[in-house]
Image (cartoon, rainbow, N blue to C red):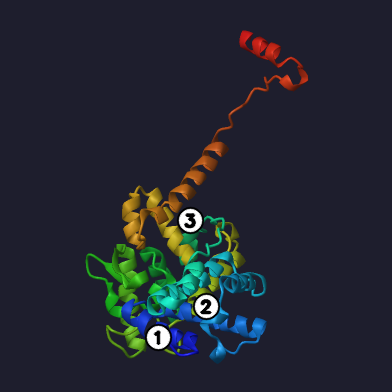
Amino acid sequence: MRENDFSLLMTSFFSKHLPGQRNLSKNTIDSYRTAFILLLDYFSATFGMRADRLQMKDISQERVFSFLDWIEGKRHCSIATRNQRLAAVKSFFNYVATRAPEHLLLCQQISAIPQKRTGQKPPVYFSPEGMAKLLSMPDVSTWIGRRDHALLVLLYDSAARVQELIDLKARNVRVEPPPTVTVMGKGRKARTTPLSLSTARVMEDFLKERFHRFAGNRDSTLFVNSRGEQFTRVGIAGILDKYVEKMRREGFAEFIPGPVSPHCLRHSKAVHLLRSGVPLIYIRDFLGHSSVTTTEIYTTIDSEQKRKAIENALHIPIQENSVDWESNKDLRDWLVDLCAR
């Protein structure tokens, strides 16, 4: 291994290991790349080390800890983002352990860094009434409104992640009975989910108009912007924000569950399926979760909502008949008296 071993290992990690041996998706590799761009920026700003001069001996567990603190404190990133960056760093050092065993001790030290625990926030989701209001907001007398309506309907009914929706091709949507959509999920795992007949009708009309307005075929990107280009995450979020704001302007703010993102529609579908009596294991497959443990968060949400509804419906009176034993200096006498009641 040459002197600047860090550069060699990093190049091999990104050019061969991640895309070739692990077959990771472009989005995952981009996330890893961002983590190491930040790491290089940190070493440059803090220690004055240029990226092309950085070596394995310059890295330590203590410096990785300080890098994570820098992400949180200076860049004001969330704990979840901090943990994502740490996962990328650990993945690299797991690779280094197999390629450069002389750094095995360092690799073990980096791998031992724990993820920071964070309180899991309950997912934000629309009520069925709120979802109906949202889907009624686009002006379907215009092409943009019809496109946005189809986009939101499919995003909700398929419970797709926003990137899954962005990557959809026209051929991935089947409008003939039984209507389905096939998305490419995390880890490049394809899953096919059923669509309602009403969603199938919306998508059938949309597909006809989409191909009339923009050149393309069944292999073309399903949803495109006004320039015929593929959407970005920001673009999809902007469409949702536009109609949430319209709900607020038109007096339907009570149906807005809080800060809304495209993922909120996925949560909404999961909760609505659960309340309709769909078994949790089917919802797991519908969402593409690797474990039903991940899906169980929705049972917690639904149980809490039921508890609140019951409490609001029935107030149970509690009699104030307690005795203050602290005022009685003789605890034994108090206990004897209590048992005699």
Q: Which residue is under mark 1?
A: 12
Q: Which residue is under mark 2?
A: 35
Image location (x, y in percent) of residue 195: 31, 64
Query: How crowded is the residue under tag 3: few (<14 C-alpha within 10 Å), some, or many (20+)?
Result: few
Of label 2 and label 3, which has the lower sequence position? 2
Image location (x, y in percent) of residue 333: 70, 11
> For the point 35% across and 47% down, which residue is it?
277
> For the point 39% across and 86% down, which residue is it?
15
Quadrant location of the C terminus in the rendered image: top right
Distance from Cα at disc 3 to Cα at disc 1: 52 Å
Cβ–Cβ under 8 Å for marks 3 and 1: no
User: Callout 1, which amino acid?
Assistant: Ser
In the rendered image of this protein, does residue 32 appear above or below residue 122?
Answer: below
Residue 298 falls left or right of residue 200: right
Kind of element beneath mark 3: helix
> For the point 33% across and 49% down, which residue is it?
279
Kind of element beneath mark 1: helix
User: Callout 2, which amino acid?
Assistant: Ala
Distance from Cα at disc 1 to Cα at disc 2: 16 Å
Of label 1 and label 2, which has the lower sequence position? 1
Res 137 seen here: no
Q: Which residue is under mark 3?
A: 129
Q: Residue 2, which numbered label?
A: none
Quarter location, residue 259: bottom right
Distance from Cα at disc 2 to Cα at disc 3: 41 Å
Image location (x, y in percent) of residue 31: 47, 77
Res 177 seen here: yes
Residue occupying the far top of the picture: 340
Residue 259 falls left or right of residue 200: right
Depth check: 239 or 338 in front?
Answer: 338
Image location (x, y in percent) of residue 20: 32, 82
Of label 3 and label 1, which has the lower sequence position? 1
